[in-house]
Image (tube, helix red, strand yellow):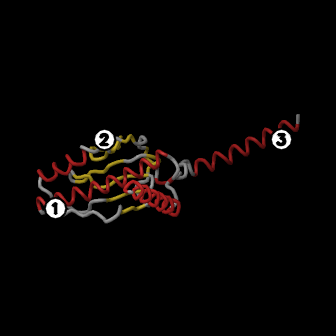
Amino acid sequence: MKKLLIISASVLINTAIFSAESEKRLVLPLDHNSPELKATFNAVQGINTLAKIVEKEVCTRWGAFLLSSKDCLLNAHYDQTEQGLYLNIYNGIPNSLETPWGKVTFYGERSLSESETKEVQKKFLEKMILKPVEKDRSFFSIVSFNDIKLPDAEELDEEHYREYKEVEESWKTMMEQYKREKKKALN
């Protein structure tokens, strides 16, 4: 009987330790071999490319001033998701994404007329299916991009954010894969 009680106590202690560790880190590490994560990363790159194209068209047609970075401007310290993507809209213009890697910003300051704003919205919305998030009218879950379904977006509490080094390594690995596949598709 004593052995059974000792084993039970040991199981309880190990379970409690595991539970405490689980509460400390509930989010799974970024798996660059996951098809869902790959689709999410490709969508981030596609949306950034779309932002550059829209920027050129808007600047050419109307002389408006939009800022987008050469590559995605990633900040791993903000707006990480468990999975999937959220689109943030600022002054009527798609501005940034919340991703598993953090916040990706593609437009900075802008001054657009109402017709310019509607043109930018139209170009983005024809490539995406969005689902409004109830708490905010300028915050949307991206259901699909270019007809590719994305994982359901799930917010991540800041206390559970991935470590910067993990995010940086994952982003670098995913970018290398993305560039290789893009190069391969061109050949």
Please tell me whether residue 27 is drawn above or below residue 70 in the rendered image. above
Residue pointed to by mark 2: 130
Tell me which amino acid carries mark 1.
Answer: Cys
Q: Quadrant of residue 70?
A: bottom left
Element type where label 3 sits in the image:
helix
Total numbered badges shown on the rendered structure: 3
Tell me which amino acid carries mark 3.
Answer: Ile
Q: Residue at x 73, y 41 (%)?
A: 12
Tell me which amino acid carries mark 2.
Answer: Leu
Going from N to C along the chain, the mark reached first, 3 or 2, is 3
- Kindly indicate whether the residue at mark 1 contacts the one at mark 3 (C-beta within 8 angstroms): no
Name the residue furthest top: 1
Going from N to C along the chain, the mark reached first, 1 or 2, is 1
Residue pointed to by mark 3: 6
Can you tell which of label 3 and label 1 is closer to the viewer?
A: 1
Q: Residue at x 84, y 36 (%)?
A: 4
Location of the C terminus (image quadrant): bottom left
